Image: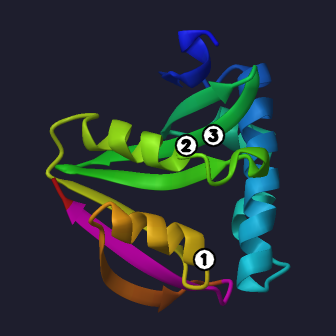
Amino acid sequence: MSSKETMIEKIDHSEISNAEKIHAIFQVSYRIEAELLGVTDFPPLKRSIVDFLNSDTLFYVLWKEGILAAAVEIDLLENTLDICSLVVHPKYFRQGIAQKILLFLENYDDSATLIVETGWANAPAIALYKKFGFHETSQYINTGGIKKTCFSKTK
């Protein structure tokens, strides 16, 4: 196995082939979350390839066996790293990939705080964030009627 296959690397989402790959992994991963939440109208599934091409956020990916195994979308706010999305291809669930990405993000920059949110019924994601020392900060219902749980972690 080459080191590239387990390395987390920045990906240029403004290149169409990369935007297509990111879009594809978001589709397969977020379908699982939509099922967990019991919803059919799920905003992350509505993101188009053009949305990824034009995004102002940063994307990092992890390859495994030549397949895009995971992607994380982040936004750097004032002294805070916002984990906008963290997706793992279902083929690679429960293999420690999301943990590896969270470790990468903890050391990404000198932001004092990491924040993330997920659907309130996404038990695997909630368990992961709590395992990594994130604390629930709030819950809200978004404009689509989906209950979300917000987490924060001070480095």
Q: Which disc, if any, is residue 100?
A: none
Q: Is residue 68 left or right of residue 126?
A: right
Whole-percent x and y of residue 67? 76, 27
> For mark 1, what is the residue?
122
Residue type, numbered disc 1: Asn
Foreground label between 2 and 1: 2
Q: Determine whether label 3 and label 2 are within 8 Å by CB.
A: yes
> For mark 2, what is the residue?
97
Q: Earlier in the sequence, mark 1 or mark 3?
A: 3
Q: Earlier in the sequence, mark 3 or mark 2?
A: 3
Q: Residue at x 58, y 30 (%)?
A: 62
Secondary-structure class at tag 1? loop
Q: Residue at x 47, y 89 (%)?
A: 140
Q: Measured along the vertical axis of the image, is residue 53 above or below residue 113?
A: above
Residue type, numbered disc 2: Ile
The reply to whether residue 32 is in sight is yes
- Residues rendered magenta in the picture: 144-153
Does residue 150 belong to the magenta stretch?
yes
Q: Determine whether label 1 and label 3 are within 8 Å by CB.
A: no
Q: Is residue 110 left or right of residue 72?
A: left
> For mark 3, what is the residue?
70
Spatial separation of the CA atoms under disc 1 and disc 3: 17 Å
Classed neighbour count for the residue bearing mark 3: other residues with Cα under 10 Å, few (<14), some (14–19), many (≥20): many
